[in-house]
Image (tube, rainbow, N blue to C red):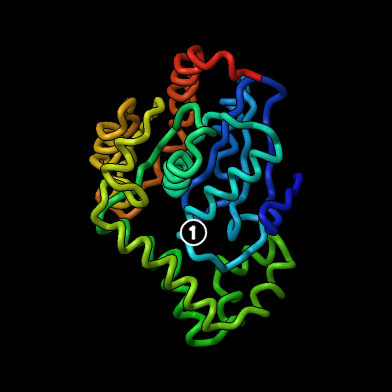
Amino acid sequence: MPVANVRGVNINYQVLGNGGDWVALSPGGRREYAGILPLAEKVAAAGYRVLLHDRRNCGASDVVIDGQESEYEIWADDLHALGSQLDIWPAFVGGSSSGCRLSLLFRLRHPEAVRALLLWRVTGGQFAAKRLAENYYGQFMDAAKQGGMQAVIETEFFAERVAANPANRQRLLAMDPQRFIDVMGHWREFFLRDADLPVIGASEEALRSIDVPACVVPGNDWTHPRRVGETASRLLPQGELHILMPTDEEIDLATEGWDEKQDELASIFVEFLGRVREPDAAHAR
């Protein structure tokens, strides 16, 4: 797959489709983009060009633990720079869970680049904030405190980053453990601070300011409660709510059933894109 140098970081990416309007999609968690490849293929087959990428610190892209802003704001600016290199803006932008968070921040930071939003498995609430703060940051801070950077690269997540991109090993080992702990702690605070917001990463005021069409498909677990997606769709001025999973599961993270719903999810998005692209026909490339 091609690699682009984006703001000094090597980003692994893929483009699907040979023509049509651009759609940039991002996966949830810290997953590699392959996790949403089946969905992206269905969208591309409907006549769109789809940009997928491994965010920094994810997949086969470079690991760079640094920055004063939240990690999802950094991801948003990386996506803008990557899309600018590929000349895709304005485009439709969307994602699942952390990719949803990235998409909302992207629209707030780069409003001119977004034609509409595709948001699924929206994250919010105290449980999600505390759980993700520990999963994304806390556990790795503990590893660095106990065994330095060697212990960090031996964790399952960072071992996978080294396997996918061997240059990440030396990059991590060269990092001062206290600096790693400080940056990860700084990023963790953004999650904990946002625990009482309607969605993690965006206030009610911010959501109300997003005046582009938005297709919202809520999740169905304690990390992505249905009510959070419903609230987001209500606060977004042009939000459309589409229920794919009608019942919340009483578990941290529900995965069962989502793979089987990929055709239905793709159909929701393709139908939505077909409707909202018409007013912006002048932007079609």
Q: Residue at the location (40% across, 25% down)? A: 213
Residue 13's quadrant in the figure? top right
Q: Residue at the location (34% across, 30% down)? A: 244
Q: Quadrant of the C terminus?
A: top right
Q: Nearest the camera: 44 or 108?
A: 108
Residue 173's quadrant in the figure? bottom right
Q: Residue furthest right?
A: 2
> What percent of the width, then of the height, locates residue 108?
43, 42
Residue 228 placement, left or right of 257: left
Residue 59 placement, left or right of 128: right
Count all numbered tags in the image, as a single digit. 1
Q: Nearest the camera: 25 or 8?
A: 8
Is residue 68 shown above or below 266?
Answer: below
Q: Residue at the location (45% across, 31% down)? A: 117
Q: Quadrant of the N terminus?
A: top right
Residue 240 placement, left or right of 21: left
Residue type marked 1: Glu
Q: Residue at the location (38% across, 41% down)? A: 121
> What percent of the width, then of the height, locates residue 264?
44, 25
Q: Nearest the camera: 103 or 133?
A: 103
Is residue 154 shown above or below 88?
Answer: below
The residue tagged with tag 1: helix, strand or loop? helix
> What percent of the width, then of the height, locates residue 68?
49, 65
Q: Nearest the camera: 76 or 124?
A: 76
Residue 79's quadrant in the figure? top right
Which residue is labeled 1 in the image? 71
> What percent of the width, then of the height, locates residue 51?
63, 36
Residue 217 placement, left or right of 247: right
Dot 1 alpha-carbon crowd within 10 angstroms: few under 14, some 14 to 19, many 20 or more: many
